[in-house]
Amino acid sequence: MRRSAAGRVARALGRVEIVLVSASGDDRYFRAVALEADASGSLLAARRSARREFGVRGTDVFAPHLSLAYGRIPAGTRASLVRGAADVLPLRFSAASLEVVRTEGPPREWRLLSAIPLQPSRP
């Protein structure tokens, strides 16, 4: 069910343009060091499409990001990593696939279930 829904979302989307705009780090295990994405344009449209297809309701906060490091990283080390990551910003790229990942358990147990190509956007 989830994979077929993801396939429908992927077919409805073109490539998703992502712009990473800032670097951050904090005490949250899965956001120890991250690059924050601009939450607009095709990324926001992709989120809306996925929420519709999967029947997600509510008003949760949308905070798209690319995690660079997970874990309990000492504050000084984390700050240094964030400064280094900020040097590459802004960074723009097109997502070429939609991936479905089972994220149960610790990250080493996560499994890629499906990678669905996104077709280039039509002019």
Image (spheres, rainbow, N blue to C red):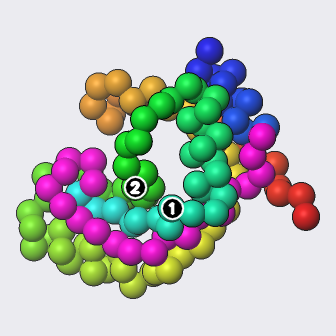
Dot 1 corresponds to which residue? 39
Residue 73 vs residue 42: left or right? left
For the point 18% across and 61% down, the residue is 26
Residue 88 sits in which quadrant? bottom left
Magenta-drawn segment = 12-31
Q: Is residue 100 above or below residue 85?
A: above
User: Within 10 Å of the Cα at label 2, are there few (<14), some (14-19), or many (20+) other Cα atoms?
Assistant: few
Considering depth in this image, is 52 or 89 the residue closer to the camera?
A: 52
Residue at mark 2 to residue at mark 1: CA–CA distance: 7 Å
Q: Quarter of the image containing the C terminus?
A: bottom right
For the point 45% across and 26% down, the residue is 102
Q: Is residue 48 above or below residue 101?
A: below
Q: What SS does tag 2 mark?
A: loop
Considering depth in this image, is 65 or 44 the residue closer to the camera?
A: 44
**Please, what is the three-letter code of the amino acid marked with disc 2?**
Ala
Where is residue 108 drawn, in percent x and y? 33, 33
Q: What SS does tag 1 mark?
A: loop
User: Is label 2 in contact with label 1 (beta carbons under 8 Å)?
Assistant: yes
Where is residue 40 drawn, in percent x and y? 57, 63
**Please, what is the three-letter code of the amino acid marked with disc 1?**
Ala
For the point 82% across and 55% down, the residue is 120
Where is residue 72 drawn, in percent x and y? 13, 52
Considering depth in this image, is 22 or 72 the residue closer to the camera?
A: 22
Which mark is first along the chain, 1 or 2? 1
Q: Quarter of the image containing the N terminus?
A: top right
Dot 2 corresponds to which residue? 63
For the point 36% across and 80% down, the residue is 86
